[in-house]
Amino acid sequence: MIYEQAKYGLTALTQGEISNSGLTDKAVSHLKRLSELAEKQKNAPINMWIKRESMQIGGNIYKRIKEELESDYYDNGCLEGRLEAIQDVSGALRIRVKDFLYPRAINCIVPERMIDTVLHSFRKRVEIEGIIHYRSNGTPISIEANSIDVLPEDNELPTAADVRGILTSA
């Protein structure tokens, strides 16, 4: 089963079907790196053996994955999720927010003035407002944060019994 999935995934990537390859983001990332090596070696393919059958990883996979993962458009908006990771990358603070609507965490670029807010928001539900960068299929890739608001946890929200009677006609 695993061999068939690997073979199918690699074939799908070769044909440019990244989202339908059935591979995890991590697997796609590793294959992108291998393909990038092939590209740097004047497109000399790298052989990957699956059940004694050679499959070639060429530079074309790198180009297709790069095109698919690049941002196609951006717009102002907000994302909601749980702030999961904080990282300082060459002077720029980056955080990752996991939105339950999307399979992977979304990168957030945060200005220096918001460091205290980020540190106090770690592992909490947040709403981040800013410029969101999207893929062509509408999946958000990243957001350049302008503001971060901490949202109440599920156990802090009113229950159905608490709000009963608000709508008298219901």
Image (cartoon, helix red, strand yellow):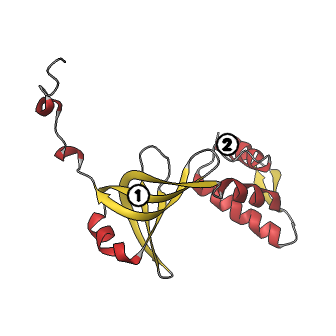
Please determine whether, in this image, residue 137 is positioned above or below residue 34: above
Q: Report the residue marked by disc 1.
A: 129
Give the residue drawn at x 62%, y 44%: 137
In the image as oriented, which residue stretches furthest toward the bottom?
91
Q: Residues within 10 Å of mark 1 (few under 14, many from 20)?
A: some
Tell me the quadrant of the picture where the C terminus can be found.
top left
Q: Is residue 26 visible?
A: yes
- Which amino acid type is marked by label 1? Glu
- Which amino acid type is marked by label 2? Gln
Answer with left or right where residue 114 lies relative to residue 130. left
Nearer the camera: disc 1 or disc 2: 1
Q: Of marks 1 and 2, which one's residue comes earlier in the chain?
A: 2
Q: Which label number is shown at residue 50? A: none
Q: Where residue 84 appears, x then y in whole percent?
A: 38, 60
Q: Residues within 10 Å of mark 2 (few under 14, many from 20)?
A: few
Q: Which label number is shown at residue 5? A: 2
What secondary structure is found at the residue carrying circle 2?
helix
Please determine whether, in this image, residue 1 is positioned above or below residue 126: above
Task: Give the quadrant of residue 88.
Answer: bottom left
Q: Is residue 58 visible?
A: no
Give the residue drawn at x 34%, y 61%: 148
Give the residue drawn at x 67%, y 42%: 5
